[in-house]
Amino acid sequence: MLDEKGGSLKTDQREPTWVTEMHEHFQQTGAFRAEDLERVLGNPRESVGVQAATGFGSFLPRSE
């Protein structure tokens, strides 16, 4: 369901408590807590593996 201005979807769900606390902490201090950043962004000490699921040929235009 769209909001009155036709923008984002409305939901009946409330945001999790930790999200509310994260926003309140940011408003009070101007900074995010390390545990909140790690929860949102992941552990910065772990690498992320990325592997293409397709070959290079899939990016070339097809000649039909």
Image (spheres, rainbow, N blue to C red):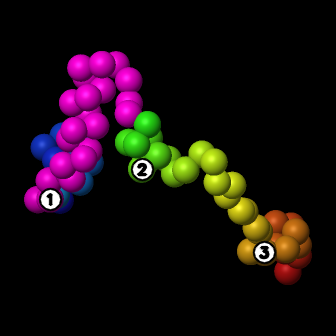
- Give the alpha-carbon distance from disc 2 to disc 3, as whole Å: 30 Å
Which corner quadrant of the image does residue 24 belong to?
Answer: top left
- Give the alpha-carbon distance from disc 3 to disc 1, as whole Å: 37 Å
- Which residue was labeled with disc 1? 13
Q: Secondary structure at mark 3?
A: loop
Q: Amino acid at mark 1?
A: Gln
Q: Earlier in the sequence, mark 3 or mark 1?
A: 1
Mark 3 and 1 residues: CB-CB less than 8 Å, in contact? no
Nearest-to-viewer mark from 3 and 1:
1
Position of 18 relative to 28 (above/below): below
Q: Secondary structure at mark 1?
A: loop
From the viewer's perspective, is 63 left or right of 24?
A: right
Name the residue nearer the viewer: 22 or 15: 22
From the viewer's perspective, is 59 left or right of 34?
A: right
Q: Amino acid at mark 2?
A: Arg
Nearest-to-viewer mark from 2 and 3:
2
Q: Residue at x 13, y 43 (%)?
A: 4
Name the residue nearer the viewer: 64 or 44: 44
Q: Amino acid at mark 3?
A: Thr
Q: Earlier in the sequence, mark 2 or mark 1?
A: 1
Q: Looking at the rendering, in which quadrant would you find the C terminus?
A: bottom right
* Mark 1 nearby-residue class (10 Å; few <14, some 14–19, many ≥20): few
- Which residue was labeled with disc 3? 54
- Give the alpha-carbon distance from disc 2 to disc 1, as whole Å: 20 Å
Q: Is residue 48 visible?
A: yes
Q: Which range is magenta?
A: 12-33
Picture coordinates of residue 41 (x, y %)?
49, 47
Q: Secondary structure at mark 2?
A: helix
Which corner quadrant of the image does residue 12 belong to?
Answer: bottom left
Q: Residue at x 82, y 66 (%)?
A: 59
Position of 8 relative to 26 (above/below): below
- Which residue was labeled with disc 2? 39
